[in-house]
Amino acid sequence: MARQADLSAVVRRIVAAMKKETVRGEVARYIPHLSGVSPDHFGIAIVTAAGEIVSGGDCRIPFSIQSISKVFGLTLALGNVGSRLWERVGRTPSDTAFNSISQLETEGGIPRNPFLNSGALVVADINLSGRSAESAIAELIGLIQSLACDDGICVDRELALGEAGTAYKNIALLNYIRSFGNISGPLDAVIDLYHHQCAIRMDCLQLACAGRYLMTGGAVLRDGRSIPEQVVHSINAAMFTCGLYDASGEFAFRVGIPAKSGVGGGILAIVPGVASIAVWSPGLDRNGNSVLGVRALEDLVQTAGWSLFVGGSRPMRQG
Ligand code: GLN
């Protein structure tokens, strides 16, 4: 495993390299509050299994976690209904965009996986379970605060309202899934919960801390509930196969670890048993994944020997 001194040097090198990059992608413009974010940002934070924290760049600037929230929503839902969740949502990769509607028609309103917008809307419906959107989002925030050991994490309500005002595709997806009977709660509450969870603000350090349970194989929350190993296994598997949408296969080849991206430019990536990593840079590629985030993870994982496909971590190589 990389020693902290090595890891700090690698992170410093990556931050300096990312600062110089000129091809940084395009920020998400379809969500009003994201269109004004500067593409110049880059932040990274790593928490290791030994409890070391190495971070750099804009690692303390909060950003909108967007679809990374689907990881935490799925964690809650699997805790609430267990494997029955998979009767309503598939768990295979898609070859369509994160907000695509087409596959729902041929697959009877069952979203292909929980990380597509369609899948996350069904997961939100499960998490709502007869309550108000307000209490369901409070439960999700409570989970994230507990995982990150940080009560400062909250929702950017203006961002959520801004997205809701232009969320024609998400509204279409929700209505379409409902027409197949795969949504049971009130549509406005389901979409409200979904948009509020996407608008959660975290910085890289908070996100890497919140992801530790996926590195360690579980967690005991401060309310006494625990996240079992089986849930962690399912989520890491879903992140690995579906976390970067139709670029998940490409990411497996380039990087080789489970990860989940969001259109705010963040990526949470896990080296099971070794590290929880968060990167953020707002410029996206055409699949909606952070350009510099993917590049930084590729560099870090190759340098540290953290790919799952090379037989475990090995001493740090540099240069
Ligand atoms: N809130 C965004 C949406 O619903 C999330 C998409 C994403 O991060 N990929 O489109």
Image (cartoon, grey):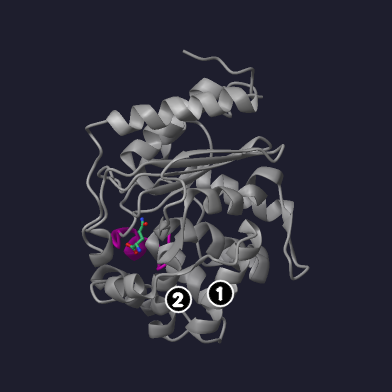
Query: Which residue type does callout 1 highlight?
Result: Asn
Q: Which residues are magenta?
A: 100-111
Would you call the spot at circle 2 few (<14 residues within 10 Å), some (14-19), or many (20 or more)?
many
Residue of label 1: 127
**Near-viewer residue (234 or 5):** 5
Task: State whether residue 14 is above or below residue 279.
Answer: above
- Can you give x and y, in whole percent of width and height, for residue 254 in the image? 42, 28
The answer to whether marks 1 and 2 mark residues whose Cβ atoms lie closer than 8 Å is: yes
Depth check: 297 or 204 in front?
204
* Rendered-image quarter of ligand 1: bottom left
- Helix, strand or loop at label 1? It is helix
Visible in this render: residue 300?
yes
- Near-viewer residue (222 or 66): 222
Q: Please report the residue visible at 34 percent of the width from the left and 32 percent of the height from the top.
A: 18
Determine which of the numbered discs, if any, sits on residue 193 in the image: 2
Q: Of the residues shown, which amino acid type is indicated by label 2?
A: Leu
Q: Is residue 63 above or below residue 281?
A: below
Q: Is residue 250 visible?
A: no
Q: Residue at x 53, y 52 (%)?
A: 207
Q: Quadrant of residue 104?
A: bottom left
User: In the rendered view, would you say 151 is above or below 42?
Assistant: below
